[in-house]
Image (cartoon, helix red, strand yellow):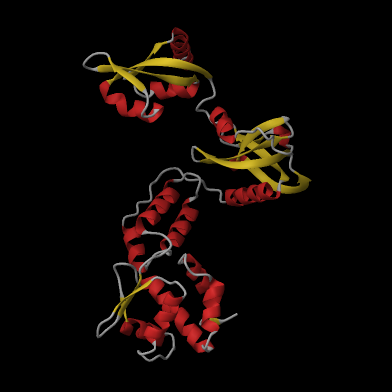
Amino acid sequence: MLAFGSYPCCVYTQKIVALTVVEPQKFLQCLEDDLVSHSKSRILHILNYLWQNTDAEHYATTADILTYLDERGISCDRKTIPGDIQKLCDIGVDIEEERSRENRYSLSSHLFTLPELKLLIDAVESSKFITTKKSTELIEKLSQMSSTHQATELKSNLYISERVKPMNEQIYYLVDNINTAINHRKQISFRYFHYDQHRKEVPNNDGKRYRFSPYFLVWNEDHYYTVGYSEKHQKIGTFRVDRMKEVNILTADAVEKPTDFNLPEFTRQVFDMYDGSSETVTLLCKNDMMNYIVDRFGDAVETSPIDYEHFAAGGGVSVSQTFFAWVFQFDGDIQIKSPELVVDRYKAMLTNALGK
């Protein structure tokens, strides 16, 4: 393997892959033609410098590149730089050049745009599933997918909220094991627990291991779940990954997933949103509740004005505690008017919640 400094060539070829248009084999093959090892090293250093220090708004001059090479003990004539840049361009690296007395160069496209990186970083930061330590590590890695100028801009606008984060990093290895089992269609075994009133972990199933055939990993409400066939329950079910311990991949093949299994329908039923009987309800809403009605029922929801302050909205819902909780959060600004059966169930839930 070609190496220079303390960094193996593969480190840089990985960055070339990140440029989206360059294949490492093609890159190295191109460099093999009429180039000695010293030239390969120089070109890779140039690419690395452009990757780290330039973007669509920031350029590097020939003098900048020569200084960078000289600091690394690589001698080079300024007349050589345009040829090295051209070799990178020939294999698809997107380098812009401004010709003048002092030529300027920039790597005009990285794998991600700045807004895309911002979205990814925000997703990492806001996830309750990812520990504070891992969030910091991932954000740092994502920042390295841009130039140092863009990385500084990203970090200057970053706010790490104080929302609840998990402490246990073992969950990443659990997810990896489950994903491996899914890909190889193997069963897994594990222990499962819940918390008691003292926040102590209490093993389920008398501490015995579960055998499970995982089919999917599902992200819901900031938690990972695995969906598959449970040997204990003799049916398809779910387990929350952060409540699993000692996940082992077994040699036994997984129980085949039913051909008619519908994951979207299953998750709608299981993950608390649509797990009740279906009913068409009429809601009485204050006018400033329209945004919430559209968010909940979609743009095609049927609405009609009632008076200057209220409108009615109608739609199909699954009558469940989740639906009732959604209505309750609006403190009377959205009320269930019909059917009477649903109104009665809502009143009963409120009565039970008050302990009456």
Residue 349 placement, left or right of 299: right
1 relative position to 350: left or right: right
Q: Report x, y in % for residue 290.
A: 30, 25
Of residue 25 and residue 202, the one placed in the foreground of this image is 25
> Residue 159: percent from the left, percent from the top?
35, 51
Residue at the spot x=78%, y=45% of the render? Answer: 252
Image position, residue 231 (x, y; %): 74, 34
Determine the residue positioned at 46% across, 51% down: 132
Name which quarter of the figure residue 264 lies in: top right
In depth, the one of 175 and 236 nearer the eye is 236
**Picture mark count:** 0
Q: Looking at the picture, how far across and down is residue 248, in whole percent? A: 71, 48
338 vs 14: above or below: above
Up/down of 34 relative to 252, above or below: below
Q: Residue furthest left?
A: 308
Q: Residue at x 60, y 48 (%)?
A: 175
Note whether residue 87 is visible: yes
Question: Which residue is farthest top?
Answer: 340
Is residue 6 visible in the rendered image? The answer is: no
Question: In the rendered view of the protein, which quadrant contains the N terminus?
Answer: bottom right
The one nearer the camera, 149 or 244, is 149
Q: Quadrant of residue 237?
A: top right
Find the residue positioned furthest to the right: 252
